[in-house]
């Protein structure tokens, strides 16, 4: 550390014992980067027909996301015809909770055959640590989550899912969206300097997908850099299709020991948003199994609904339950 490294002229005798924990961590990370099997390079994502076909299937798996999926399809077709990497502008999917925004993002990444790195902005308390990390002078310093994901990944173009970006609130002295801007701005993302290892990373090929419930919470300079799509709650046939997909996935998770529900049962279950449906259907399958049946009935759905809606009754805290007899002063 602190002088040039002469490669094959050097001989490694182990880490100096004088290193503190932060320096040791940085030294080990730099050594891992130096011995990276791909010499710091990751393949770009150049589409083939199989990618176009796979993304096309996402249209049927994610009703209501057709405009977003079509944009990805056009980007894949352009990549295939020109032999250039897929280029997708940073996307913002916003709408009410439970509309499948996160699920659709994962489906798109899977169809493109690339990795997805999901970051929950609502639980992140340090935007700088999220993007570029901290120098070793900081307590508990480490690489940025984005740069470390790229270093540990297999693609130069992963999908970066910024989940609930409208809830990115960190400590009072930080302006979190200013830090995020470095990753979304193409010029700066090409030479994004990780503060911990002091190595530049190229995130310009990453496919950024942000989700939000309320875009009004986001600053204009962030929204200007995002291509925004409103995702409305599914209704009618679209909601029924989503319900069937969730039910089929759950049947697979249960190893086929239960049947895919009939249309009338699915129609009854489709009154609920997709976020609640998985829990509701699993509870309903429990009622069916207890009754010795593999097939759901509407009664199973109704029973599961009652269980979900039931509010817990307040119970006294202590070793003895309260007991009251007749009379104003007869309480134990």
Image (cartoon, rainbow, N blue to C red):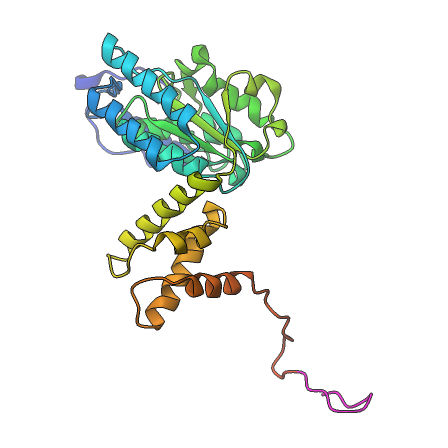
Q: Dividing the picture into quarters, in which one does residue 175 lie?
A: top right
Left or right: 171 as drawn, with respect to 228: right
Residue 45's place in the image compared with 289, above or below, is above
Q: Compared with residue 272, is residue 232 higher up or lower down, i.e. above or below?
A: above
For the point 52% across and 19% down, the residue is 181
- Provide residue 220's location: percent of width, then percent of height: 61, 19
Residue under the image location 53 percent in, 39 percent down: 122
Magenta stretch in the rendered image: 322-332
Q: Is residue 127 visible?
A: yes
Left or right: residue 232 compared with residue 53: right
Query: What's the magenta bit mostly, secondary-structure-wise?
Result: loop
Q: In the rendered view, tell whether residue 224 sits above or below residue 62.
A: above
Q: Position of residue 48 (x, y in %)?
A: 21, 19
Q: Split into 4 quadrants, where in the image is the N terminus? A: top left
Q: Is residue 117 left or right of residue 84?
A: right
Could you tell me residue 303's position as x and y percent? 47, 66
> Could you tell me which residue is drawn at 25 percent across and 21 percent down?
42
Q: Residue at x 25, y 8 (%)?
A: 82
- Is 308 colored magenta in this rendering? no
């Amino acid at each position: 550390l602190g002088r040039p490294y002469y490669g094959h002229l050097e001989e490694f005798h182990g880490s100096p014992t004088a290193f503190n924990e932060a320096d040791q961590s940085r030294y080990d990370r730099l050594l891992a980067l130096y011995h990276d099997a791909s010499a710091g390079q990751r393949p770009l994502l150049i589409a083939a027909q199989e990618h176009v076909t796979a993304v096309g299937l996402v249209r049927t798996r994610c009703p209501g996301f057709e405009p977003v999926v079509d944009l990805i399809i056009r980007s894949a077709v352009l990549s295939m015809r020109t032999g250039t990497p897929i280029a997708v502008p940073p996307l913002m999917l916003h709408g009410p909770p439970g509309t499948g925004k996160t699920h659709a993002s994962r489906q798109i990444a899977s169809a493109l055959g690339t990795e997805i790195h999901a970051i929950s902005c609502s639980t992140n308390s340090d935007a700088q640590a999220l993007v570029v990390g901290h120098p070793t002078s900081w307590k508990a310093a480490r690489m940025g989550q984005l740069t470390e994901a790229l270093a540990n990944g297999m693609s130069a173009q992963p999908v970066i899912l910024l989940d609930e970006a409208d809830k990115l609130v960190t400590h009072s002295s930080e302006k979190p969206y200013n830090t995020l801007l470095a990753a979304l701005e193409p010029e700066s993302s090409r030479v994004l300097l990780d503060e911990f290892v002091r190595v530049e990373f190229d995130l310009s090929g990453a496919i950024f997908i942000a989700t939000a419930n309320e875009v009004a919470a986001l600053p204009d300079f962030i929204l200007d850099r995002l291509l925004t799509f409103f995702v409305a709650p599914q209704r009618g046939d679209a909601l029924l299709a989503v319900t069937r997909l969730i039910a089929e996935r759950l049947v697979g998770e249960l190893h086929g020991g239960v049947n895919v529900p009939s249309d009338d049962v699915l129609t009854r279950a489709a009154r609920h948003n997709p976020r609640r449906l998985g829990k509701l259907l699993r509870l309903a399958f429990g009622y069916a199994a207890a009754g010795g049946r593999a097939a759901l009935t509407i009664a199973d759905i109704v029973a599961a609904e009652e269980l979900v809606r039931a509010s817990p009754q307040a119970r006294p805290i202590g070793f003895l339950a309260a007991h009251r007899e007749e009379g104003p002063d007869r309480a134990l």
